Amino acid sequence: MFFFLPPASDRPPVRLIVATLLTSLLSTFLLSPQAQAQAAPYCQQSQAAIDQKEALRRLAARGGNQDAQKRYASLVKQHGERLQKCRKQTQLQTQAIWLRLYPCDAKPGALESVLDQIVNRGYSQVNVETFYNGRVLLPTTDNPTAWASVLGGSKAQQADLLAEIIRKGRARGLKVYAWLFGMNMGASYVSRPDKQQTLARNGLGQTSLTASTVAGLSVDIGLTNPEEAFIDPYSPQARQDYAQMVQAIVQRKPDGVLFDYIRYPRGYGSASVASKIQDLWVYGEASQQTLFQRALNYRGMELIRRFLEQGYITGDDLKAVNQLYPQEREPLWQGLDPKRTTASLPLARRVARLQADLWQLSVAHASQGVLDFVSAAVAPVQRQGIPAGVVFFSDGNSSVGRSGFDSRLQPWDRFSGSLEWHPMAYANCGSAKCITAQIQRVLQAAPRGTKVKPVLAGVWQQSVSNRPPLEVQMQALQRMAPQVKGVSHFAYSWQEPGSDRNRKYCQP
């Protein structure tokens, strides 16, 4: 849909246009007799209540009008209570939305406007992007981390937007989660001379900065993100820096913390499949050292070293290792049965078996790095009694062909059931079938009692990127998995593009 706008000098402010269009859309789609009958499951506010609250917010934001401020606060509380009551009566008791903040959100009334729109649409939780693209949502004057502040260089650099949105969100009956990137720590971080050793590397001499990779949600359209940079999950330096950042976040006492990008990069084209050791991101200094330490004897360590260096082993390698360590009978490493023997096998079969075992060891080692990173990341959160969750692709752990694996190597099926699971169901086949299939795969693998809260991508009342409207996806989910009690939608910027654009590019 396109709208013709008059010259800038003749037209009202963009915010007013967006508000008018939103009002029109809500009136058309949410307040028609048919829509009113369907509104209860989504817990939207009535249009009259939305208009009243917005008018009071504008008056309250100007300052000096104490009556308007009191009436606005009272209405905000009423809407929050109404929202909570509605959510308790619906199948999906949690409906969250993903949100990015900008320096302009520090302006008086700005956060209130965003949060009011979120409540108006029936959302009970907001997942605030707190660490992304090598930046962290902390004030520059209180940022003990290795990353620059999102607010750096702006007039709002001393604002504590995370603390503010937690406080103002709760006043509206919302839960506020901090959403953090994980192993993708940003190009600005790894480009520092003292951090370059933290980069993940593959056997082709590449890092995620130089390899052909695909970014985030753009897996279906091939876009890249120059800000992405993946670290070696075994790097002590990266883990220490990350833990310090997480600790600073939990001091703000969010209602939960979600960890995203807990995986390796996804290669583009044929590189999306890891089928040989050089494809794995295990060539970082810390990862290599840890892999060597998985050997249980010298023969095992030497074969691991040769396999890592060459990409294969030969009969000559096996003979050389036997001569180097004649006192040892079998090469051993973690995962092998110490009682097994290959000495009686013909040399060619012995080499083939050991090479297959080395490949499985390498894949397991890469996957274990992700699991260890998650365990270290969630520890400061769980120590504070704050819920922690993991965000992942349901196909990120897929096997491909006889011995290949999805290059992301995201072993989500081995994540702890004590964590919230947030599978990103972003399939785009033109219907909801492929989306619910992704969710069903996760539900079947989840340990009993795991809170599975699928992430859906889309917009209400319209299809986007070959995905059906959100209400179609929601209805399909509820039919397929009535046991699911929580869901989230990516993203606020998709649903409110005008609001996101104005806030992103305005002058704080």
Image (cartoon, rainbow, N blue to C red):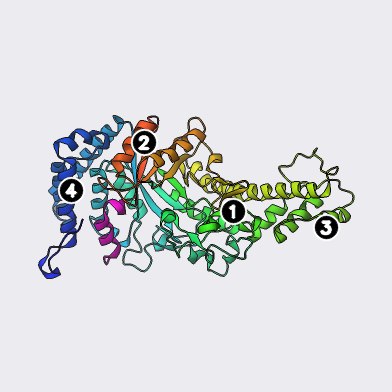
349 drawn magenta: no
**On the rendered image, what quadrant is the C terminus found in?**
bottom left
Q: Position of residue 319 (x, y in %)?
A: 85, 55
- Report the side of 337 relative to 73 (left or right): right
The earlier-in-sequence mark between 1 and 2 is 1
Badge 4 density bin: few <14, some 14–19, many ≥20, Cα 10 Å: few
Amino acid at pointer 3: Asp
**Residues at marks 2 and 3, CA–CA distance in whole angstroms:** 56 Å
Closest to the camera, between mark 2 and mark 3, is 3
Badge 3 density bin: few <14, some 14–19, many ≥20, Cα 10 Å: few
Amino acid at pointer 2: Leu
Q: Which residues are magenta?
A: 492-508
**Residues at marks 2 and 4, CA–CA distance in whole angstroms:** 25 Å
**Residues at marks 1 and 4, CA–CA distance in whole angstroms:** 46 Å
Amino acid at pointer 4: Leu
Badges 1 and 4: C-beta atoms under 8 Å apart?
Answer: no
The earlier-in-sequence mark between 2 and 4 is 4
The earlier-in-sequence mark between 3 and 4 is 4
Residue tagged by mark 3?
316
Instruction: Give the residue displayed 61% in from the left and 60% down from the top.
Output: 202
From this viewpoint, is residue 145 visible?
no
Amino acid at pointer 1: Ala
Badges 3 and 4: C-beta atoms under 8 Å apart?
Answer: no
Q: Position of residue 472 (x, y in %)?
A: 30, 40
Q: Position of residue 122 (x, y in %)?
A: 26, 40
Q: Position of residue 338 (x, y in %)?
A: 79, 40
From this viewpoint, is residue 180 visible?
yes
The earlier-in-sequence mark between 2 and 3 is 3
Q: Residue furthest left?
A: 10
The earlier-in-sequence mark between 1 and 3 is 1
